[in-house]
């Protein structure tokens, strides 16, 4: 990637669950490690540091009129297509190689249960598929976290759940009541004459951001997590949490960019 594409690359890796945030660092998930291992194994000519150097050299030759873009594309695409076709013909074999024995018997037909990969991660499935379609989650999800907020539809308590796109609030009477809402930050919207609250949302490309719950009436939004701290320099009503490798964790005013070094909140 290039500096201009780093943010989108990171957002895509999060969306596809290839990476996760551990404290202040990014770490690969089991899915990310598996995908990386497969790509490196089956596309060795692309997934190595020499590929980038050769690509840069090819672009330099085009610029110097020592080669044409068509020749450069052919040199890349023809062997790539051959490798891709070869790998495509081994998809079933590759999927089987990813299965892991569990030593557990299927509670429906008695055949061994195996660990498989799906679009949402690993899960348990009967090795007798497709004759037996018994499956279940590999790990039991954590119980919903109770809150003091009431469901606006039926009045039952709202709970915090975790879905494929992060945490959200849902009615505790689900599936009888399917009311859901974004997770509130508890921080009031800083816009003048707005009584809204900033909530966690997700963009079309999977990136987390924070916007006013009065949208579209109020279109205030920000990428970084807000904190109900008044800026000591310009008196703006909120500051945003930021972390950089150079400065660590700090608060920054979205309006005047004043910084305050503070302790990071946990939980």
Image (spheres, rainbow, N blue to C red):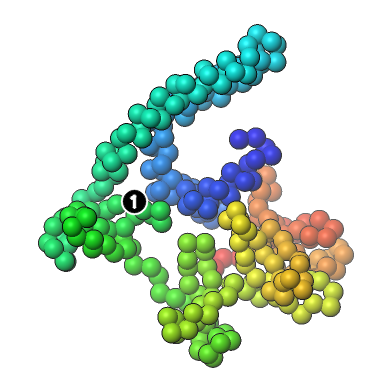
Name the quadrant containing residue 222. Answer: bottom right
Relative to 255, residue 92 above or below: above
* Picture quadrant of residue 153: bottom right
Residue 40 vs 117, above or below: the answer is above
Is residue 149 toward the left or the right of residue 197 in the image?
A: left
Whether residue 203 is situated above or below residue 87 in the rendered picture: below
Q: Nearer the viewer, residue 240 or 129?
A: 129
Q: Position of residue 173 (x, y in %)?
A: 44, 85
Q: What residue do we see at 66% from left, 15% from top?
A: 62
Crowding near the residue tagged with mark 1, few <14, some 14–19, many ≥20 C-alpha atoms within 10 Å: some
Image quarter where the N terminus lies is top right
Location of residue 253 in the rendering, given as x and y in whole percent from the top left corner: 79, 60
Q: Is residue 104 visible?
A: no
Q: Nearer the viewer, residue 76 or 195?
A: 76
Q: Which residue is mark 1?
A: 117
Residue 35: percent from the left, percent from the top? 41, 42
Task: Name the residue nearer the viewer: 76 or 1.
Answer: 76
- Which image quarter is the C terminus in? bottom right
Count the marks.
1
Q: Residue 105: where, in percent of width, then height?
A: 15, 60
Residue in the foreground of this view, choosing between 131 and 60: 131
- Residue at screen point 29% across, 52% down: 116
Question: Seen in the image, is 104 located left or right of residue 82?
Answer: left
Q: Tag 1's secondary structure?
A: strand
Residue 184 horizontal side relative to residue 35, left or right: right
* Residue under the image location 83 percent in, 60 percent down: 255
The answer to whether residue 63 is above or below residue 230 is above
| Residue 95 seen in render | yes
- Residue visible at 53% across and 80% down in the picture: 179
Residue furthest left in the image: 110
């Amino acid at each position: 990637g290039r500096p201009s594409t780093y943010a989108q690359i990171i957002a895509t890796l999060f969306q596809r669950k290839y990476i996760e945030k551990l404290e202040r660092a990014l770490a690969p998930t089991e899915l990310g490690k598996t995908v990386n291992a497969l790509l490196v194994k089956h596309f060795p000519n692309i997934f190595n540091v020499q590929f980038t150097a050769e690509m840069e050299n090819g672009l330099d030759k085009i610029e110097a009129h020592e080669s044409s873009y068509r020749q450069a594309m052919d040199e890349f695409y023809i062997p790539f297509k051959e490798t891709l076709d070869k790998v495509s013909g081994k998809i079933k074999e590759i999927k089987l190689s990813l299965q892991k024995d569990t030593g557990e018997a299927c509670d429906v037909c008695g055949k061994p249960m195996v660990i498989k990969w799906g679009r949402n991660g690993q899960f348990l499935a009967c090795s007798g598929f497709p004759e037996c379609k018994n499956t279940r989650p590999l790990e039991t999800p954590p119980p919903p976290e109770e809150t003091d907020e009431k469901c606006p539809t039926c009045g039952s308590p709202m709970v915090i759940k975790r879905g494929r796109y992060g945490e959200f609030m849902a009615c505790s009477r689900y599936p009888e009541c399917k009311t859901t809402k974004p997770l509130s930050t508890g921080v009031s919207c800083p816009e003048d004459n707005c009584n809204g609250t900033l909530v966690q949302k997700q963009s079309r490309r999977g990136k987390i951001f924070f916007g006013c719950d009065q949208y579209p009436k109020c279109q205030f939004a920000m990428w970084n997590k807000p904190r109900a701290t008044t800026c000591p320099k310009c008196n703006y009503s909120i500051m945003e949490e930021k972390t950089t490798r150079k400065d660590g964790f700090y608060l920054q005013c979205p309006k005047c960019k004043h910084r305050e070094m503070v302790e990071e909140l946990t939980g």
